[in-house]
Image (cartoon, helix red, strand yellow):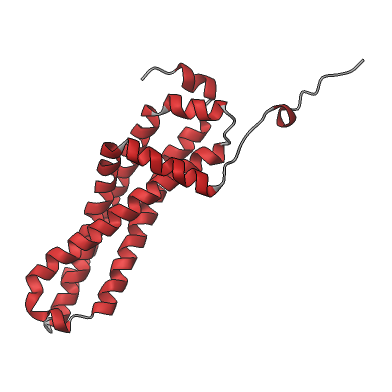
Amino acid sequence: MATMNSNPAKTERQISLPFSQAFKIALRNITIRLGRAMITGAGTMLGIAFLMSVFTSAAIQQAKGIEIQVEQQQKNTWLVVMSLMVSVVGITNAMLMSVTERYKEIGTIKCLGALDNFIIKLFLIESALLGFFGSLIGSVLGMGFMLLTGVGVLGTINWPGLLLQMLMCIAIGTTLSVVAAIPPAMQAAKMQPADAMRTEI
């Protein structure tokens, strides 16, 4: 008597789309929810703007020959760390709300056979894009605002060092955005398709 194959791995059809396809879907999700995306990106933008303003202020003071006191450096470091922590909490909260709003969408994707790691990939790509653009805008705003106060010493500022710090700010903002999105992404991936389809928002 023939027995039925009960191995789920052989009976379930699951898909794992390439990174380029996941990138396109993530970009589409951002454009569809542009308002929420701007709010999420604003958290990163403000934190990075403050960080870049501290770096630019230090570069201006160095160009003027002013020595920065140790106490002031410690105070600036503490303020920067606190602002970045607030940004991370804000991003995590916004991404958790995004997961809640997209229960049915996530359930539909999983019912079509999407793997858990694909769901995680979608959310992490979205947060990376928001973090990158938010950090880029924040770096430009933070540096630009502080340069207005040091117009007289623009020619003596260490521009290569300042641009390197700008790239570092963008990298920090993008990384923090991805890290902050990991808990919401894991929550979305663990969601049961049937439960998600039954959820009323």
Residue shown at 24%/57% (left/top)? 137
Residue 45 position within the rendered picture, expressed as x and y whole percent measured from the top left: 25, 53
Drawn side of residue 189 relative to residue 180, left or right: right
**Percent coordinates x, y for residue 46 in the rendering:** 21, 53
For the point 49% across and 26% down, which residue is it?
107
Q: Residue at x 18, y 60 (%)?
A: 141
Residue at horizontal 40%, vertical 29%?
A: 102
Residue 188 in view: yes
Q: Is residue 152 left or right of residue 105?
A: left
As drawn, which residue projects farthest toward the right?
Answer: 1
Question: Which part of the image, by quadrant, shows the N terminus?
Answer: top right
Q: Classify 46 as above or below 7.
A: below
Taking the image as shown, residue 68 lies to the left or right of residue 180, namely left
Q: In the visual, does 150 lie left or right of 51?
A: left
Name the quarter where the C terminus is drawn: top left
Q: Is residue 171 above or below residue 190?
A: below
Residue 68 showing in the rendered view? no
Q: Is residue 114 above or below residue 46?
A: above
Viewer-proximal residue among 29 and 179: 29
When the figure is inspected, residue 2 is found, relative to residue 189, above or below; the finding is: above
Q: Position of residue 177 (x, y in %)?
A: 36, 50
Residue 187 position within the rendered picture, expressed as x and y whole percent measured from the top left: 46, 34
For the image, the number of numbered tags is 0
The answer to which quarter of the image holds residue 7 is top right
74 vs 172, nearest the viewer: 172
Viewer-proximal residue among 63 and 28: 28
Nearest the camera: 186 or 123?
Answer: 123
